[in-house]
């Protein structure tokens, strides 16, 4: 996909995640839309495009968040490197594979965010965060992924792989 | 027709004149009556049929008129719907501003700046909002943020035209507080999932479900007597040094639209 289109899509998703989704959320939790888009695209397109999306999406999240600039981008890049390996998996055509990946990836993203934030001096209540935030958010993201992944697969087929030029 | 051609015109005229004479003398009346009786149903049917044709034509005309009227009415409905939404929004804003005004009147010592919430933190593990007032509006780090319902949090970062506010529900937030009835003090801290808990309440102090929790003003970061929430559960164990109380915040953090920043307080 054209990098400019990726910038537009991921910035819009980040804005949506910080403005509209909190109003629609139940129990104070909202889907990690940008993380889901980045990880899914990495699965569908492979590591090269996945990394570009991770960088753009991570920066968009950092700009709208209280997190230090670059923290989300770093976490997303590392997660994309890991999960994009799944592109070669023989199971990737099954919907269950991306669902499982998204659960683990979003869980890992929030965990790493909290860890990074704690290293910078912010207190973290691990036990409560695990039960009240990390686990429910992972499940919520997995549910949202059910309609989102087929949509992204369609977009993947429509746009076709493209050489990414930096 | 060929036979008729042979009839002279004079003979035809004679016939006509004879008919006229019979008509004038009413001698043709019985014949006319018979003919009228015969034609009446036919006339009526034909007239009705003509009427129907006229009606069909009128229907088409009416249909056109109705269609254009319908389009105009639909436009009007759309305009009214938009107007209704705008009025409803204005009404909600009006209610919020009235509540803010009442809060200001009840707290004349506070210098307040009203602000609109323009964004939430995209992460689920952090409880922050972004507001549309910044250093250019006199906002500075550390200023308390409230609504008419109670304490929201404090400003932690400012930009020229916006600021970031840390909710009291964030795990890194701590507010010195007291229980209204018993005057027992403690610290209200945020917890994951958007709740708050009051910690470090001395053993022996009376804490009841339903008690109101207010800011104590200790430390000088927040003014005194700002409402934080109500006690929903108490955790007391004799082997521990302190008691804890679960607090239900009075502010609905999920639906915040407007807030007030206390820029100065005594």
Image (cartoon, coloured by chain):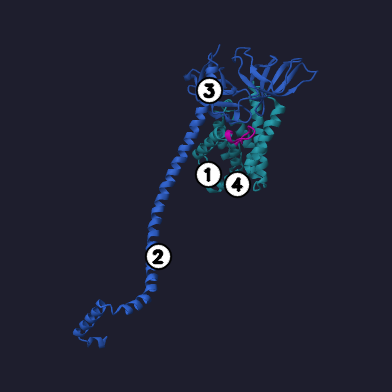
Q: Which mark is residue A162?
A: 1
Assess whether mark 4 and mark 1 are in contact (beta carbons under 8 angstroms): no
Residue B221 lies, in percent from the top left, at: 60, 14
Question: Gap between marks 1 and 3, in whole Å?
Answer: 54 Å
| SS class, disc 3 | helix
Disc nearer the start of the sequence (1/4)? 4
Write down the colour of chain A.
Answer: cyan
* Circles 2 and 3 on the same chain: yes
Q: CA distance from mark 1 to mark 2?
A: 68 Å
- Residue B145 spot, x, y in % from top left: 56, 21
Could you give the CA–CA distance between mark 4 and mark 3, rounded to whole angstroms? Answer: 47 Å
Residue at 64% across, 29% down: B125
Q: Which mark is residue B100?
A: 3
Q: Output the chain of dot 4.
A: A
Q: CA distance from mark 2 to mark 3?
A: 68 Å
Taking the image as drawn, is residue B231 in sight? yes
- The residue lying at 61 percent from left, 14 percent from top is B224
**Residue topped by disc 4:** A150
Residue bearing the label numbered 2: B52
């Amino acid at each position: 996909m054209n990098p400019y289109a990726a910038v537009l899509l991921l910035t819009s998703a980040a804005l949506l995640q910080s403005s509209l989704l909190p109003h629609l959320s139940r129990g104070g939790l909202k889907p990690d839309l940008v993380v889901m888009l980045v990880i899914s695209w990495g699965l569908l397109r492979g590591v090269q495009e996945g990394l570009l999306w991770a960088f753009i999406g991570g920066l968009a999240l950092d700009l709208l968040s209280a997190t230090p600039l670059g923290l989300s981008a770093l976490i997303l890049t590392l997660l994309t490197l890991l999960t994009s390996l799944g592109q070669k998996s023989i199971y990737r055509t099954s919907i269950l594979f991306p669902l499982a990946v998204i659960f683990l990836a979003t869980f890992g993203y929030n965990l790493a965010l909290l860890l990074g934030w704690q290293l910078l001096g912010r207190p973290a209540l691990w036990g409560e965060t695990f039960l009240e935030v990390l686990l429910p958010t992972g499940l919520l993201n997995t549910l949202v992924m059910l309609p989102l992944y087929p949509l992204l697969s369609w977009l993947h087929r429509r746009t076709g792989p493209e050489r990414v030029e930096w | 027709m060929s036979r008729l051609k042979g009839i002279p015109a004079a003979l035809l005229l004679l016939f006509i004149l004879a008919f006229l004479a019979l008509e004038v003398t009413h001698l043709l009346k019985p014949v006319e009556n018979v003919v009228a009786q015969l034609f009446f149903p036919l006339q009526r049917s034909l007239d009705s049929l003509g009427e129907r044709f006229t009606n069909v034509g009128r229907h088409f005309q009416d249909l056109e008129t109705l269609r254009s009227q319908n389009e105009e009415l639909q436009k009007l409905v759309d305009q009214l719907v938009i107007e209704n939404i705008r009025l409803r929004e204005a009404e909600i804003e009006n209610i919020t501003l009235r509540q803010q005004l009442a809060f200001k009147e009840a707290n004349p010592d506070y210098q307040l700046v009203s602000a609109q919430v323009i964004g939430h933190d995209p992460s689920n593990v952090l409880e922050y909002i972004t507001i549309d007032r910044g250093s250019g509006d006199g906002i500075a780090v550390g200023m308390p943020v409230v609504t008419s319902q109670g304490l929201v949090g404090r400003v932690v970062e400012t930009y020229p035209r916006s600021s970031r506010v840390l909710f009291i529900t964030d795990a890194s937030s701590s507010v010195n507080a007291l229980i209204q009835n018993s005057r027992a003090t403690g610290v209200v801290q945020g917890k994951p999932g958007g709740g708050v808990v009051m910690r470090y309440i001395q053993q022996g102090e009376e804490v009841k479900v339903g008690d109101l929790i207010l800011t104590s003003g200790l430390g000088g970061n927040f003014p005194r007597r700002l409402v934080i929430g109500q006690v929903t559960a108490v955790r007391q164990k004799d082997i521990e040094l302190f008691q804890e109380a679960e607090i239900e915040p009075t502010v609905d953090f999920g639906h915040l639209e407007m807030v007030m920043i206390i820029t100065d307080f005594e």
